[in-house]
């Protein structure tokens, strides 16, 4: 198996870094909370550990994945954002999870824009989706701020009910209007 180097991305306020085994307690706290309800939680400590292993393994299997998001100024971890496409997923996704107390500050949008730029500019993606539960108004707002538009419904593996698919503008559309138009 080939080792993968996970790039570090930076934005104005954030550092997107590789998930690390030391992040387990942060994920245990997140997955024990109701904030995780839209992403398969709540989960036990053991299940949160397995989720961290999945996040790290996704990088090896796909060559991309989700980053832990830290505030650059303080190093505090505020969420997990990035690229996701497990087996039988509808298609490659940009996803975001913010941890308790960090919503409403634009962190998800800022980090997801960096992840999308990486997907398009480095990985050569020409499209991406975000899956959003019908009851998750915050995530729907992030998708819209990024310029994504509703594009049907899907029921990914492990989900009991369909979720909304938001289609992100492709690299060509962004080049014409610029990312700033969607922030």
Image (cartoon, rainbow, N blue to C red):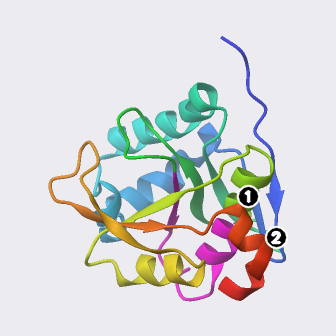
Q: Quarter-wise, where is residue 165 in the image?
A: bottom left
Asked if labels 1 and 2 touch by Cβ distance under 8 angstroms, the answer is: yes
Say which element carries label 2.
loop
* 97 magenta-colored: yes
> Which x, y percent locates residue 126?
64, 52
Residue that badge 1 annotates: 16
Q: Residues within 10 Å of mark 1 (few under 14, many from 20)?
A: many
Which residue is found at the position 56% from the left and 80% from the top? 102
Residue 61, label in figure: none
> Which x, y percent locates residue 53?
50, 33
Going from the N terminus, do you reach mark 2 or mark 1 first? 2
Which residue is found at the position 28% from the left and 57% from the top? 42
> Which x, y percent locates residue 158?
24, 44
- Is 115 located above or below residue 145 in the figure? above
Number of on-image labels: 2
Which residue is found at the position 79% from the left and 32% from the top? 5
Say which element carries label 1.
strand
Left or right of 96? Residue 72 is: right
Residue 11, label in figure: 2
Say which of 179 and 94 sits in front. 179
Is residue 47 visible in the rendered image? The answer is: yes
State which region is magenta.
93-113
């Amino acid at each position: 198996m080939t080792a993968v180097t996970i790039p570090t991305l930076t934005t104005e306020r954030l550092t997107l870094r590789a998930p690390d085994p030391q992040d387990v307690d942060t994920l245990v706290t997140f997955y024990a909370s109701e904030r995780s309800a839209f992403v398969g939680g709540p989960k036990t400590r053991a299940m949160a550990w397995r989720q961290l292993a999945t996040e790290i393994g996704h990088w090896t299997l796909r060559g991309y994945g989700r980053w832990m998001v830290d505030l650059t100024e303080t190093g505090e971890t505020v969420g997990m954002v990035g690229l996701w496409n497990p087996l039988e997923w509808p298609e490659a996704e940009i996803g975001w999870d913010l941890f308790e107390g960090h919503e409403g500050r634009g962190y998800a949008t800022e980090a997801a824009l960096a992840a999308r730029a990486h997907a398009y500019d480095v990985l050569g993606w020409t499209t991406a989706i975000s899956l959003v539960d019908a009851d998750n108004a915050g995530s729907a707002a992030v998708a819209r701020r990024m310029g994504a538009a509703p594009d049907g419904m899907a029921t990914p593996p492990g989900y009991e009910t369909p979720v909304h698919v938001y289609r992100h503008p492709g690299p060509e559309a962004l080049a014409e209007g610029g990312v700033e138009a969607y922030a």
